[in-house]
């Protein structure tokens, strides 16, 4: 087991009615609030009015940044930074999914960025020293942005979608009832993202970080059990709460503590798909993951033991032929995604080979996947993309 550092400064209020903590969460930082949200789902579910009542009654001054896109754009970050400067904002309140929270994280860091090119900050600044405080209310279970310090920003002009360290939220409010309205497609995609965050770290060379592997397997089993329930009964509190609990822990680093880092190959490959085709992150991951698994298992059979463990401990499969077992674990994962309504080929998303070479080169730029669980080069990634067609 390797050394690790636990350093997550976010205070989380989890559960029905947690919005009662919003006022105190904001007031500790001041009364000038930037409210960031997406394309309007928070208005449809009445959350916007609920928040505005709390803020108006509490004497807060609110500036709004609406229309933050899924796969948030650098232009929205720039607009947010400008609004914060113009209005002398004390604290940013992000209400929505990973896209809104990520955009607001970049705004918080961009506020103190001294250069004039915010894309340069996303690309090159590793962990800005100072950021505005961020409070968030999560409305979809997927990314874990509420409990990590990273954010992913897209530049459609350069076809780049890049993850960066910005800032951790100071306070995250996680009320599963806000996710009742999430569509079946986004619920399934979000669950695939949660599972991917686990699988990216689970497939590691380290064999003896037992708690980390146990947490990872439990999260996978919890999502596998609760996603079909949430799809059938969108307002099933227990199912939504379990998915939300999983999403928050899955990307926090905790399920990887003590383990050798793995490169997060599927995320590197997926961010290219989103950068070129603006697709839903979780859908891209669901398509890539089983293909990546089959490819690396063939490329380096010494990793088979991990796949056997995955088949047994996550899916409850049994058998004496270890290779068959490994393949069955992958097949059942693919079927699970399909059965839950996720399109499982790039063709279904109208993606063809046109940009595969550029995407593969970029995913591997600077040897990014050279130390992955199974190291990958551009030609490997090309093969995986082609297999997804
Ligand atoms: O924009 P609105 O109207 O709010 O609609 C959103 C959006 O269309 C909708 N939605 C959210 N909550 C809803 C709802 N619809 C109905 N009811 C609700 N309660 O869902 C759609 C998707 O929202 P988005 O925020 O894009 O989803 P998600 O949370 O999956 O975020 C995806 C983004 O996060 C990045 C992804 O790459 C992508 O850009 N990631 C961030 C990570 C992080 N910060 O740690 C890690 C991840 O691996 C990921 O890369
Ligand atoms: Zn992800």
Image: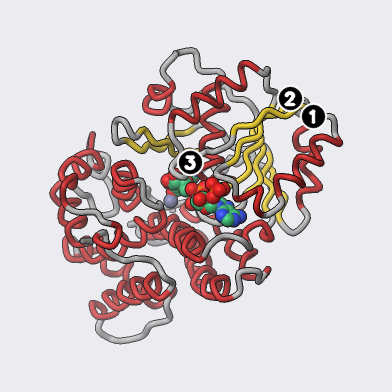
Q: In the picture provided, is 114 more to the left or to the right than 286?
A: right
The mark found on residue 69 in the picture is 3
**What residue lies at 38% left-to-right and 61% top-to-bottom?**
207
Secondary structure state at the residue bearing disc 2: strand
Whichever of labels 3 and 2 marks the residue nearer the N terminus, that label is 2
Secondary structure state at the residue bearing disc 3: loop
Task: Tell me, yes or no, whether the two marked residues, 3 and 1, touch with CB atoms within 8 Å.
Answer: no
Would you say the beta carbon of the disc 2 residue lies within 8 angstroms of ligand 1? no
Q: Quadrant of the N terminus?
A: bottom left
Quarter-wise, where is residue 121 in the image? top left
**What residue lies at 61% left-to-right and 69% top-to-bottom?**
234
Report whether residue 32 is seen: yes
From the top left corner, tell me how far across and down residue 164 is, in percent: 43, 34
Q: How far apart are marks 3 and 2 (CA)?
A: 24 Å
Q: In the picture provided, is 121 more to the left or to the right than 269?
A: right
Would you say the beta carbon of the disc 3 residue lies within 8 angstroms of ligand 1? yes
From the top left corner, tell me how far across and down residue 100 is, in percent: 55, 41
Q: How far apart are marks 3 and 1 (CA)?
A: 26 Å
Residue on which the image places disc 2: 32
The front one of 122 and 263 is: 122
Secondary structure state at the residue bearing disc 1: loop
Residue lying farthest left? 379
Q: Residues within 10 Å of mark 2 (few under 14, many from 20)?
A: many
Q: How crowded is mark 1: few (under 14 residues within 10 Å), some or many (20 or more)?
A: some
Task: Tell me, yes or no, whether the two marked residues, 2 and 1, touch with CB atoms within 8 Å.
Answer: yes
The mark found on residue 60 in the picture is 1
From the top left corner, tell me how far across and down residue 101 is, in percent: 56, 40
Numbered disc in front, either 3 or 2? 3
**What residue lies at 56% left-to-right and 19% top-to-bottom?**
82
């Amino acid at each position: 087991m390797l050394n690790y550092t636990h350093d997550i400064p976010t205070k989380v209020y989890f559960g029905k009615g947690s919005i009662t903590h919003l006022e105190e969460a904001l007031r500790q930082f001041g009364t000038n609030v930037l409210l960031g949200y997406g394309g309007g789902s928070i208005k449809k579910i009445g959350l916007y009015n609920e928040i505005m009542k709390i803020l108006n009654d509490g004497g807060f001054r609110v500036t709004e940044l609406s229309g933050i896109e899924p796969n948030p754009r650098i232009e929205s970050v720039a607009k947010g930074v400008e609004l914060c400067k113009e209005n002398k904002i004390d604290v940013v309140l992000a209400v929505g999914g990973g896209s809104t929270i990520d955009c607001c994280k970049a705004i918080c860091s961009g506020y103190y960025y001294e250069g004039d090119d915010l894309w340069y900050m996303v690309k090159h600044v590793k962990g800005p020293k100072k950021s505005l405080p961020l409070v968030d209310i999560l409305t979809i279970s997927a990314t874990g942005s509420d409990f990590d310090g990273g954010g992913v920003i897209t530049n459609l002009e350069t076809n780049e979608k890049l993850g960066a360290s910005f800032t951790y939220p100071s306070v995250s409010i996680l009320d599963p009832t806000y996710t009742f309205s999430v569509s079946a497609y986004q619920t399934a995609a979000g669950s695939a993202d949660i599972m991917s965050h686990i699988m990216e770290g689970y497939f590691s060379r380290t064999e003896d970080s037992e708690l980390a592997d146990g947490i990872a397997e439990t999260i996978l089993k919890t999502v596998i059990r609760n996603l079909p329930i949430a799809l059938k009964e969108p307002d099933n509190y227990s199912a939504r709460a379990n998915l939300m609990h999983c999403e928050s822990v899955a990307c926090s680093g905790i399920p990887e503590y003590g383990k050798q880092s793995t490169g997060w190959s599927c995320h590197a490959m997926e961010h290219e798909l989103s950068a070129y085709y603006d697709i839903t992150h979780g859908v891209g991951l669901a398509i890539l993951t089983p293909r990546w698994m089959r490819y690396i298992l063939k490329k380096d059979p010494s990793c088979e033991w991990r796949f056997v463990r995955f088949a047994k401990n996550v899916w409850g499969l049994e058998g004496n032929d270890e290779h068959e077992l490994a393949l069955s674990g992958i097949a059942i994962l693919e079927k699970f995604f399909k059965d839950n309504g996720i399109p499982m080929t790039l063709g279904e998303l109208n993606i063809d080979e046109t940009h595969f070479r550029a995407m593969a080169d970029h995913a591997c730029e600077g040897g990014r996947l050279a130390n992955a669980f199974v190291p990958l080069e551009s030609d490997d990634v090309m093969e995986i993309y082609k297999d997804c067609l």
